[in-house]
Every structure is written in structure tokens, then in C-alpha cells.
Image: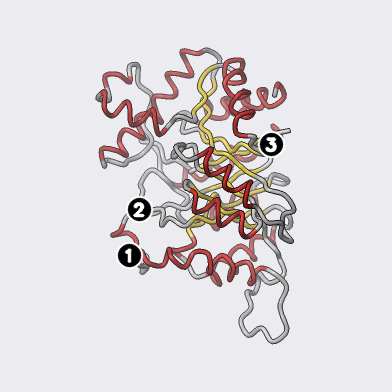
Amino acid sequence: MTAFSILDLAPVREDGNPGDALRNARDLARHVEALGYLRFWLAEHHNMIGIASAATSVAIGYVAEGTSSIRVGAGGVMLPNHSPLVIAEQFGTLASLYPDRIDLGLGRAPGTDQRTMQALRRHPSVAEDFPQDVLELQALLGPVQPGQAIQAVPGADTNVPLWILGSSLFGAQLAAMLGLPYAFASHFAPEALMAALDVYRKNFKPSPQLAEPYAMVGINVIAAETEAEARYLFTTPQQQVTNLFRGTRGRLQPPIDDIEDYWTPAEKARVRAMQACSFVGTGDSVAAQLAPFIERTGADELIAAASIFDHGARKRSFEILAGVMTQL
């Protein structure tokens, strides 16, 4: 049976602020916890006025404190932006406060642009150290070894589950080699999805954390009472990606009546390619779209994002998706 989880970017609405976005994230986490979702993940981004989860570990703690059973984690922390010791301490603290509920997904990309990387005091070349940094982080979160001079406190022996995130074959190869679960970012970069899953499964080596390959697949889901309403709500993420290509990132925009008036034919083609793993419609139509997708990918878990402007409509979308879970 395929598990279902939530990826939330704590979107900042055009008429809102980061505080509103983070309070909405916690409210959404409580809502989906009651609906039976497995995880609620937040992602690290920097210098983006439309995303409030830059201080990812702080946001995770806020959400975890407001919930009781759902797993809360990072989808992900961009490890090249940090030292492994600092992340071990942060997530060791979270795991100490919320035992058996914290996940740590790790990405190799900076999650920002070159100028912001400079502001983070990082150099693009640090991404080359990603495999070694993952191993170092894993060791810091594991049992203390005889003679170990550097310990993460908290962190040591918390054994926070690590995930490798990716949108290319590199992450798939690394996750397979280390015997870690793998999450593919097909909600915004679907092109290499099937090839990455194949590489991961064929090359997987069992580890103390994981005996068999476990693949999570990112999707976008916008569900509503009618097809027309769902398509209307979907114009918000369509505008969002169009603006990304235009280099005009901003806050989350309200839906519009006709997306064709907003984008050019070339932009439309690029946005549709980027959002190919999007499932939009009523519960029945989303179920009909998802069933062959799950069969094709063999996903052990789906993690759904929904950049819906209205918070109530976003909660309702995940209610409808919860109904789809039972159908599938």
C-alpha cells in the first residue's frame, strides 16, 4: 500500500506575511494528521519572499510542537549550506524533544542563487563534499565511538532517519550506495523520475537503517468539489512557475479566471513540462489519474504539495486527497 505525506513550503500569500504562513503550516499539519497522512515536511529556501521555511529546523519544531503523532521533517535541508555538526545538533535537539517523529531529508542543491550563497558564506564547490558530509552527519547522529573527539549534543545516538533527496541520477546513486530512502522531486523536476527510480532500485545496498529500497515520489495535487474549481485553484501554482521562469519570484498569487491570458505559448509549454506530475480535479478524477501513476512508478510513498492561495481550500484539497487514499 502506498503511503501519503505532505510537502509544505509555508507559502507567503500576496496579502500575508511569514508569521501567517507558518501558523497556516502548523494548522495544516494538525489537519492532515487527523486525516491519516504519514509525514509533514518543510523545505529550506533562502532569499525567497514567498517561502517562510528558511529556518527549517525552527519551523519543524514549531509544527512538531503543535501536533502529536505525524512525522515532521525536512524535505529538505540543503546540506552544502551547513556544517554536518550544526545540523546534527539541530535535529538531535528536535529528536530529543519529539522522539520517533523527526525525519531529515538532505539535498545537494543550495536552495537559492549564487549571491545568496555568498551571503550564507558558502562556495558552490562545497556541493562536491555532499557524500562525505552525509556520512559525517550520519556518524554524528549515531552511537558515540571509542575515542570520538567531536560529539553532537544533543544528536549522538538519536539515529534520526536520513533521506537523500534529488532530481537527477546523482542522488539516486548515492541513496542506493548508502542504503538510504530516496525522495525524488518530481513535483517540480519530473524529467528523470523513472530513470532515477530504476538506478536507485537496481543499485540499492542494504544498510542498518534500511533493508530494502524505499522510494518517495513528489507530486502536486489540487483537488476540489468540481473540475472547474480545481482548475481555477491550479492557476496559482501555474502563475508561480511562470514567474519563476520570468525571474520575478514573489508571494503566492490568487487564482485567476483565464491562465491563457497570463502566459505565452512558450511559457505554457515550459510550465506544463515542469508540472507534469500534477493531479488536478475532483476526488474521482484525481484517483483515476493517480492509480496508473502509482503503478508506473511503484512509489512506496507519495508526498503531495499544493500551492493553493486560500488556506481553507488547501485544507479541503487534502481532505479530498485523503478520500483518494482510501480508494487506492
Quadrant where the C terminus lies? top right
In the rendered structure, find residue 119 and report the number of the disc placed on it.
1
In the rendered structure, find residue 88 and report the number of the disc placed on it.
none
Q: Is residue 147 left or right of residue 262?
A: right
Cβ atoms under marks 1 and 2 closer than 8 Å: yes
Based on the displayed image, in which of its 4 quarters is residue 188 positioned?
top left
Asked if residue 31 shows in the view, the reply is no
Tell me which residue sits at (63%, 57%) in the image. Answer: 162
Quadrant where the N terminus lies? top right
Tell me which residue sits at (68%, 48%) in the image. Answer: 213
Based on the displayed image, in which of its 4 quarters is residue 91 positioned?
bottom right
- Decide which of tag 1 and tag 2 comes sooner along the chain: 2
Considering the numbered disc 2 on the image, is that residue within a helix, a strand or a loop?
Answer: loop
Q: Residues under labels 1 and 2: Cα distance?
A: 10 Å
Q: Who is closer to the viewer here, 300 or 153?
A: 300
Residue count near mark 2 (Cα–Cα under 10 Å), binned few <14, some 14–19, many ≥20: some
Q: Amino acid at mark 2?
A: Asn
Q: Amino acid at mark 1?
A: Ala
Give coordinates of residue 35: x percent, y percent.
Answer: 69, 32
Q: Residues under labels 3 and 2: Cα distance?
A: 32 Å
Give coordinates of residue 203: x percent, y percent.
Answer: 62, 52
- Decide which of tag 3 and tag 2 comes sooner along the chain: 3
Q: Who is closer to the viewer here, 310 or 174?
A: 174
Q: Which residue corresponds to mark 3? A: 3
Give coordinates of residue 320: x percent, y percent.
Answer: 62, 23
Q: Is 69 rendered above or below residue 281?
A: below
Q: Is 104 rendered above or below residue 157?
A: above
Q: Which residue corresponds to mark 2? A: 47
Give coordinates of residue 96: x percent, y percent.
Answer: 70, 63
